[in-house]
Every structure is written in structure tokens, then in C-alpha cells.
Amino acid sequence: MIRIAMFGLLLVTSSGMAADLTTVFGLQLGSNFDIPECSKQGITYQKPLAGSCQGAFSTSDSEGSYDGAVRVERAVVIFAEGEQPAIVVGNLLATTLDGNLVSIEFPTAGPVAAPFVMDALREKLGRESKAEKYQLTNRLGISTEHLSAQWNLNSVHVSYMELLPGARVGRVEIDNPSGLVHRRSKEVHPKDQGTKL
């Protein structure tokens, strides 16, 4: 029963048909990002009565920034009480380029949720293009093995990590082609950080 509920949260269906791969939780990658702004009480965004709303990811994001001639904005997506997708822990983060939604990412509940997250992603996207195990070592020196997976499709690229380093959550990143180019341009690789003693 839990698996069926999880699938329904990621898959947006219409008349029983599987949704477009670029539609996630009712948000359409590549389309104008026009969900309403969340109301605020002091500095805290309030949950909407129904559906979802958006708020600035940080104070610096409230005006957006520019990457060359492209306006880049990031926003948190907050769901109404009882409408938060079960595989999302916390808020969903959306990235837009010139007002069009290009990337969505959200935290997951870590290793305990991995089977449900993988089932939901496979149900929507099919078999993953790549899956591999990786090791993380905690402060006590204990190493644990975790799963990462990717789906490389024409219209969407999805990356999943069961557990982030130094955290208790995992993460799903969903990009259309423009979003993937933008994300990769912002990634910092160990070789770019220089040698630290």
C-alpha cells in the first residue's frame, strides 16, 4: 500500500495515462514557473491552503542573479498541509532560467527511504541508466555502503544519492537539458579546489 501511494506522488497522471517525464509533482520542466508566491508571517513562509507556493531560497535569491545574459532564480516550493509528497523531506528547490523551470531537487529520508524512492523513479522513468555503490565514512571511522543512480533520457536527467556526505538525507536532482548544462557549469570538482594540507 505504501509503495502505491509513493508512486502516485511522483507520477502525475491524466485520465490514467502516465505523465510526461518532465512533469514532477505537478511542476513542468521547460515551462514558465508561475506558481503563486507564499505569504509570509515575519520572515517565515506560510504553507498555502491548497497546492503549492514559492518563496525565495535565500535573501540573495529574492532578486535573482545573472549567468551571462540569462536570469537565474532559485525558489523553495512549499506544499499545503497533507499535500507534501511523501518522498520529499523538507522543501523542494526549483531553479529557473529566464523564468522557465529547468531544475528541481529535493531531499529524501536517506537509506530508510531508498527502496521507495528507487521504485518511484523506476516507475516513472524506467530502468536507471547507471547505478553504483559508494562508501561514506562517519566521524567514528565507520564506513557504510550506499546507492547512487542516474537516468539519462532525452528530455530529462535524474540523479539520486541515497545519502549525502555529512548528512542524514539523500537527494534527487531532476534537470531538463538546459538545467543540466547550468548545474554542471556550477559544480566544483576536487581537482578545481587545489591541494589542501
Image: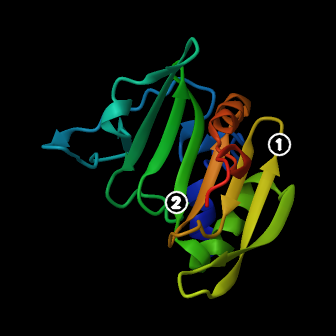
Disc 1, SS: loop
- For residue 102, side relative to residue 63 (left or right): right
Tell me the mark number nearer the camera, choosing from 2 and 1. 2
Q: Residues within 10 Å of mark 2 (few under 14, many from 20)?
A: many
**Separation of marks 2 and 1 at Cα, in angstroms:** 22 Å
The residue that label 1 is drawn on is: 153
- Res 120 quadrant in image: bottom right
Residue 72 visible at all = yes
- Of callouts 2 and 1, which one flags the residue occurring earlier in the amino acid sequence? 2
State left or right for residue 1 relative to residue 19: left
Outermost residue on the top side: it is 69
- The quarter of the rendered structure image containing the C terminus is bottom right
- Residue in the foreground of this view, choosing between 185 and 40: 185
Q: As shown in the figure, which amino acid type bears the numbered disc 1?
A: Leu
Image position of 147 (left or right of 99)? right
Residue 135 horizontal/vertical position (percent)? 72, 76
For residue 15, say whether it is visible.
Answer: no
Find disc 2 in the rendering and name its residue: 107
The amino acid type found where label 2 is placed reads: Pro
User: From the viewer's perspective, is residue 4 above or below residue 43?
Assistant: below
Residue 111 x/y as whole percent: 61, 77
Using the image as rendered, state which of residue 68 and residue 22 is in the foreground. Answer: 68
Residue 44 placed where, x, y %? Answer: 21, 47
The residue that appears at 58% across and 15% down in the rendered structure is: 68
- Residue lying furthest front in this view? 197
Q: Is residue 181 left or right of residue 48?
A: right
